[in-house]
Image (tube, grey):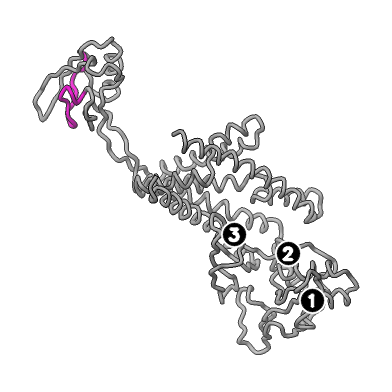
Amino acid sequence: MNLLAILSPIFWGLLVLSLLVFVHEAGHYGMARLCGVRVTEFFLGMPFRYKLSHKSKKYGTEVGVTPLLFGGYTRICGMEGELDELLPQALMSVQEAGMLEVGALAAKLNCEDERAFSLLYTLADWGSIELVKESESEELAHTVFQTLARDAELRCEYDRGHNFELEGSTAAGEPRVPQMSTEEFFAQEKAHTYVGVNVPKRLLMILGGPLVNIALAFLLVVGSLMFVGVPTAQNKAQLGSVESNSLAAISGLNPGDTILTFNGVEVHTWEELTVAIKEAMSADGKDIPVTYDRGGIQLETTIKPVLRPDDKIIGVSPVMITYHFSFIDASAAAVSYAAQVGQFALRLLIPTQTMEVLNQSSSVVGISVMASKAAAEGFSTLIMLVAAISMSLGFMNLLPIPPLDGGKILIEVIQIIVRKPLSIKVQNILSYIGLAFFLFVFVVALRNDILHLLFR
């Protein structure tokens, strides 16, 4: 195996999957901003110490890329940490002090360092304060958090319309006591977080990623069918191609010849010719007389199956044309394809069909190989593969299995039913169960890819 054969799947796999993950996370980001919720980070690649990034002056979001590709994340404020009755006092304490150690907050609120740290960590996740110094020891007491820069209207860098040039603005780390009650300021900050908006907005933020993937796939399929088209066989008895050294080539047939009779049977369409060929080739090697038209001249030849006794075909193909779908037909085809992908994903949840579905699945290894082959075949083939992967990514993420987006929707539904938030501990347990299941899925899919590569 040469170096190019190794590098090509890596390159195309990274390109395709990174593009689709970026689109997925952009869906979450866009919906969060639309719902007025703060977003602190938007990254291609999984969280890592080293990264390339740029901080948006308009929205405050840090946008960038990490070396751990094949993934991505959007940090929507309020999706981590736990609600606590002491959060309002903790928030106001930081605003009053400017900078505050965990130990100092614990002493002020008469609670343990662990709880004080949890309070400040939750507020930092909300985009209300920020961590500036981690403790040099295992003790949390000396971990320091500080206020964010805020304008005259108390808007921070993550809020739409902030303007730090207005009189009355304060810099990060400066005390800033709001001219309102502790509870009012807390409610104002909470309103900019995931936990502070209503359930429909939460569902929109969760659904943003999968729906954008499905929408992208729909547009790619419709666009490809309309503008690129699909190769379609013309239903006439004219030869589009003749395989070299085939029975047809040996008998003198050429591309462009129109078959008039085959083994004494008059044919007018490719379907009729196919039936005649099948019947003639099953006649124990008997010679097959053929009459055909070439440039307006009627000619005759004989196909001799005895020359290639193992062949079941004569080696001809029809004339191919490119058929362009109308918008309505292309849309109908895209919807039909989406329904098939959705049904395939749902079968994963049916115990009697789970292994059947997994045995037809591919891991990132198989996807990378397919992307490389599609790129080699041409742009239109690559576009259709991207659409297929994007559609699958969208529907798979809707499965009600934590930590997938569908799993987060499941948690929201459970919380509505029980009328109280699930604890972080319970949510983590559900996520660990889901991760264990997807580790099993990955192992089976990787096995499929390895077996396919070794024994193809």
Q: Which residues are magenta?
A: 248-264
Label annotation for residue 142: 1
Mark 3 to mark 1: distance in Å?
29 Å
Comparing 114 with 302, the one in front is: 114
Residue at label 2? 196
Residue at label 3? 46
Label annotation for residue 269: none
Count all numbered tags in the image, as a single digit. Answer: 3
Residue 250 in magenta stretch:
yes
Name the mark nearer the viewer: 3 or 1.
1
User: Looking at numbered disc 3 in the image, what kind of residue is underneath it?
Assistant: Met
**Mark 3 or 1 closer to N-term?**
3
**Mark 1 or 2 closer to N-term?**
1
Q: Residues within 10 Å of mark 2 (few under 14, many from 20)?
A: some
Q: Residue at x 59, y 43 (%)?
A: 442
Q: Is residue 1 left or right of residue 138?
A: left
Q: Is residue 404 left or right of residue 390?
A: right
Q: Quadrant of residue 254?
A: top left
